[in-house]
């Protein structure tokens, strides 16, 4: 069995979304077909639509079509934004400094626990009925990014700043950053995605079809943010000791 977990949510001078999500996926699917692998699971993304304004989502959708053309029994998995240890959802909102956005944190999604996604992928290993199916894996509740930030601030006992930069400024600024700097910066398409709410395909299968129940974000925010509380506590203790 082969799992394709390769993906990128930003572009660089060396690769774009088509290189990774379409051409790369096609190469892997071709190898799977060539060597007569029994099962192939392709991890895509939520909101994968060829009509999407986001190139990330468009190429994810094209990648799904390409791998199915090569290997029709491919299982497509579309996870929602995932949270867990060192994620880029909760920890970004809990980070120092301001969170910069262009849509006033109004983007809506149904975050899913990464452990639930991993367990679902493991179940597919043992269930041949999942072959050729498409699964949307998402959490039980839809939130705005603003609501998730409120949950995060409640757990870390701090207020984090937020700066909203208009899209007409942010897009060309991020394009220039990504073009002229050689380290990871914010991508123009990431700004576009702030204005795209998560789309859930009503025809796709879900956790229910795997006899699973996704966990609630509220039940895990403390677990994954507790390290930040300890860091803040240690900093306070050091300050007190220096004053004694």
Image (cartoon, helix red, strand yellow):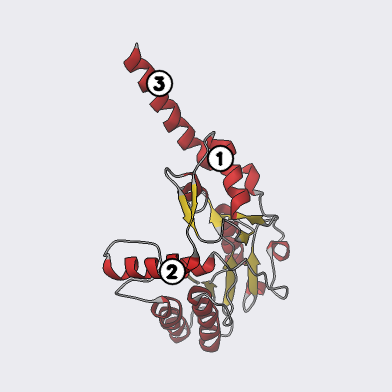
Q: Residue at x 54, y 88 (%)?
A: 69
**Contact, CB < 8 Å: mark 1 with mark 2?**
no
Q: Nearer the viewer, mark 1 or mark 2?
A: 2
Would you say 66 lies left or right of 111 here? left
Q: Nearer the viewer, mark 3 or mark 1?
A: 1
Q: In the rendered image, which residue does mark 2 sit on?
A: 171
The answer to whether 147 is drawn above or below residue 122 in the figure is above
Q: SS for tag 1?
A: helix
Q: SS for tag 3?
A: helix
Residue 154 image point, x, y percent: 59, 37
Q: CA distance from mark 3 to mark 2?
A: 42 Å
Q: Quadrant of residue 114?
A: bottom right
Q: In the rendered image, which residue does mark 1 sit on?
A: 153
Residue 61 image point, x, y percent: 55, 79
Would you say 1 lies left or right of 182 here? right
Q: SS for tag 2?
A: helix
Would you say 15 lies left or right of 193 here? left
The answer to whether 96 is drawn above or below residue 23 in the figure is above
Q: In the rendered image, which residue does mark 3 sit on?
A: 237
Q: Residue at x 55, y 57 (%)?
A: 82
Q: Residue at x 45, y 47 (%)?
A: 98
């Amino acid at each position: 069995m082969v799992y394709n977990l390769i993906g990128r949510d930003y572009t660089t001078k060396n690769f774009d979304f088509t290189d990774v999500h379409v051409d790369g996926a096609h190469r892997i699917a071709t190898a799977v077909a060539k060597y007569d692998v029994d099962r192939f699971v392709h991890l895509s993304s939520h909101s994968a639509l060829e009509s999407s304004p986001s190139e990330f989502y468009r190429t994810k959708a094209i990648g799904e079509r390409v791998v199915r053309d090569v290997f029709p029994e491919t299982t497509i998995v579309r996870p929602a934004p995932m949270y867990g240890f060192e994620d880029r959802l909760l920890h970004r909102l809990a980070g120092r400094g301001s969170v910069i956005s262009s849509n006033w944190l109004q983007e809506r999604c149904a975050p899913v626990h990464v452990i639930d996604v991993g367990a679902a992928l493991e179940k597919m290993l043992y269930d041949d009925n999942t072959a050729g199916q498409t699964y949307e894996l998402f959490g039980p509740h839809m939130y705005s990014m603003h609501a998730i930030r409120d949950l995060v601030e409640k757990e870390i006992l701090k207020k984090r700043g937020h700066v909203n930069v208009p899209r007409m400024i942010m897009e060309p600024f991020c394009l220039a950053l990504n073009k002229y700097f050689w380290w990871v910066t914010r991508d123009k398409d990431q700004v576009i995605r702030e204005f795209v709410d998560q789309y859930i395909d009503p025809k796709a299968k879900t956790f229910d079809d795997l006899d699973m129940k996704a966990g609630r974000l509220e039940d895990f925010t403390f677990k994954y943010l507790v390290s930040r509380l300890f860091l803040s506590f240690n900093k306070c203790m050091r300050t007190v000791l220096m004053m004694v």
